[in-house]
Amino acid sequence: MAMPTDIGIIDTMIGFPHKDFSQYDFIRAQTKDAQSNEDFEFPVEYMFKNVPKELYGAETDPIDVTLGEMDRLGVAQGLVGCEGDTYAEALRRHPDRFIPSASVDPNNGMDEVRKMVRLHEEFGVKAFGAFPAGCLPQVPINDAKFYPIYAKCVELGVPIFVCAGVPGPRVPMACQHVELIDQVMYDFPELVFITRHGCEPWQDLMVKLMLKWPNLHYSTSAFAPKYYPQAIIDYANTRGADRIIYAGYFPMGLSLDRIMTDMPNVEFKDDVWPKFLRDNARRVLQLD
């Protein structure tokens, strides 16, 4: 059950340190408590210890910071956004290390679908991502507003990563209930759907849904390996070795040091490790 050290890890959620936290203004636009709006720089600061804030104020190139951490800790490639100068530059300079993705907001209707096509053509986007509880207004996972986006993902042949479970920011959770995924998979059986951010407290339900729907997957974003749900570990070690995908949360809430220090203690079987750390991501992102 030893974690391999030379696997060439693919991280399906990684980013670059910024000099401020304005990237989270879209969350502050809907939080109402004083702590979130006045005290926290990072909207889920109450959940994470030792957020690597020192990197955010660094004068060094943010792309070099992330690459240095990846090189030091065995991460061969990372899935990043493609919008914004830093992300576009990273993809231009290091196409062998960074894999392009893009976020979608179903509130924008067909304009968002047209954006998906444009970014797919311009950057070769390999995945899209959505944060239902972060939309303003919120959009439930199975809402009709999401359906043109799901349909376009199927048409383009790319997966979608969607946050599911209780959101970290202090906003309502109903739109991210795991049970909503069932209807989506029924209506879009060709859609490759990967959850983000844990699915808690409905991780057991998520396992049941993965047993049911062959194109449904789970990624471990925003969780230190110490806190991976036991139901997910057990599923990976039995029938779900092809469904569980590694994702980190650097530099948003976790350092790669924290993740990779915890990781060897996860009780995955020997044959699960390569799939979890690399092979499942390669398959869903069509990197072969």
Image (cartoon, grey):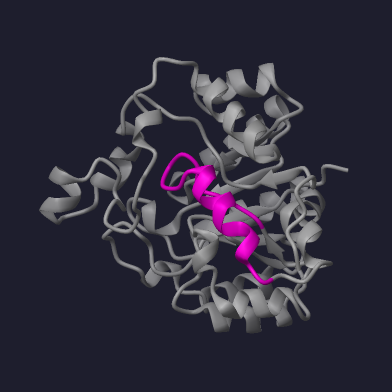
In reply to whether residue 259 is colored magenta, the answer given is yes
The image quarter containing residue 88 is top right
Horizontal and vertical percent for residue 65?
A: 52, 25
Horizontal and vertical percent for residue 117?
A: 67, 36
Residue at horizontal 52%, vertical 75%?
Answer: 180
Q: Nearer the viewer, residue 270 or 282?
A: 270
- Look at the picture and state if 146 lies above or below 235: above
Residue furthest right as drawn: 288
- Look at the picture and state if 87 lies above or below 72: above
Residue at horizontal 31%, vertical 28%?
Answer: 20
> Which corner quadrant holds the N terminus?
bottom right
Does residue 164 appear to the left or right of 68 in the view shown? Answer: left
The image quarter containing residue 54 is top left
Horizontal and vertical percent for residue 274?
A: 80, 57
Q: Nearer the viewer, residue 76 or 103?
A: 76
- Look at the picture and state if 278 lies above or below 178: above
- Look at the picture and state if 98 lies above or below 279: above
Q: Nearer the viewer, residue 40 or 107?
A: 40
Q: Which residues are magenta?
A: 246-267
> Which corner quadrant holds the C terminus?
top right
In reply to whether residue 132 is colored magenta, the answer given is no
The image quarter containing residue 4 is bottom right
Residue at horizontal 50%, vertical 30%?
Answer: 16
Q: Does residue 126 appear in the picture of this structure?
A: yes
Q: Does residue 114 appear in the picture of this structure?
A: no
Count of numbered marks: 0
Horizontal and vertical percent for residue 163?
A: 50, 59
Q: Nearer the viewer, residue 50 or 151?
A: 50
